[in-house]
Image (tube, rainbow, N blue to C red):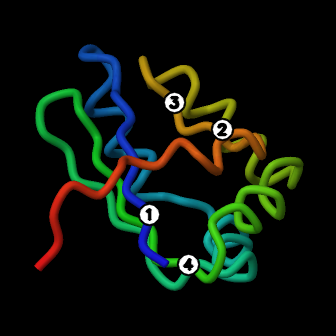
Amino acid sequence: MLIALHTAVRPDRIDEYEAAHREVPAELTAAIRAAGATSWTIWRNGTDLFHVIDCEDYARLLTDLERLPVNTAWQTRMAELLDVAHDYSSAGADAGLPVVWKL
């Protein structure tokens, strides 16, 4: 399944956000893959961040990652950089952007 998300980086933290994503911990990427994601891409337009996640089951991905120490540490780091964060709680399973059109 494909999931699209919107988050937003703080205007004064863009460089730091991008630098952090050049150094995503291997343990975190392995955990994301183990939770069923086959890809995760983030685009930035100004402070708006658009994510597309290809995964087996988004709700399961969130459940598997929600309390995982490597992910909670990453989310704590991201919380310092973001105005709008990705919701990793199981309630976040319904937070994807709605599909408007598809070719």
Three-letter residue code for mark 1: Ile
Left or right for 49, reference 75: left
Q: How far apart are marks 4 and 2 (CA)?
A: 19 Å
Left or right for 48, reference 1: left
Residue at 69% x, 43% y is: 88
Q: Distance between the residues labelled 3 and 1?
A: 15 Å
Residue corresponding to mark 1 = 3
Left or right for 90, reference 48: right
What is the secondary structure assignment of the residue under circle 3?
loop
Closer-to-camera residue (48/98): 98
Residue corresponding to mark 3 = 85
Three-letter residue code for mark 3: Ala
Closer-to-camera residue (51/73): 51
Q: How far apart are marks 1 and 4 (CA)?
A: 8 Å
Q: In this view, does 15 lie above or below 70?
A: above
Residue at 68% x, 78% y is: 30
What is the secondary structure assignment of the residue under circle 2?
helix
What is the secondary structure assignment of the residue under circle 4?
strand
Q: How far apart are marks 2 and 1 (CA)?
A: 19 Å
Query: Horizontal and vertical percent for residue 65?
Result: 78, 58
Residue corresponding to mark 4 = 55
Q: Do the residues labelled 3 and 2 touch (CB within 8 Å)?
A: yes
In the image as oriented, which residue stretches furthest toward the front?
A: 100
Name which quarter of the figure residue 103 lies in. Answer: bottom left
Q: In this view, does 52 lie above or below 71?
A: below
Closer-to-camera residue (22/97): 97
* Marked residue nearer the N-terminal end (3 or 1): 1
Q: How far apart are marks 3 and 2 (CA)?
A: 8 Å
Residue corresponding to mark 2 = 75
Three-letter residue code for mark 4: Cys
* Marked residue nearer the N-terminal end (1 or 4): 1
Three-letter residue code for mark 2: Gln
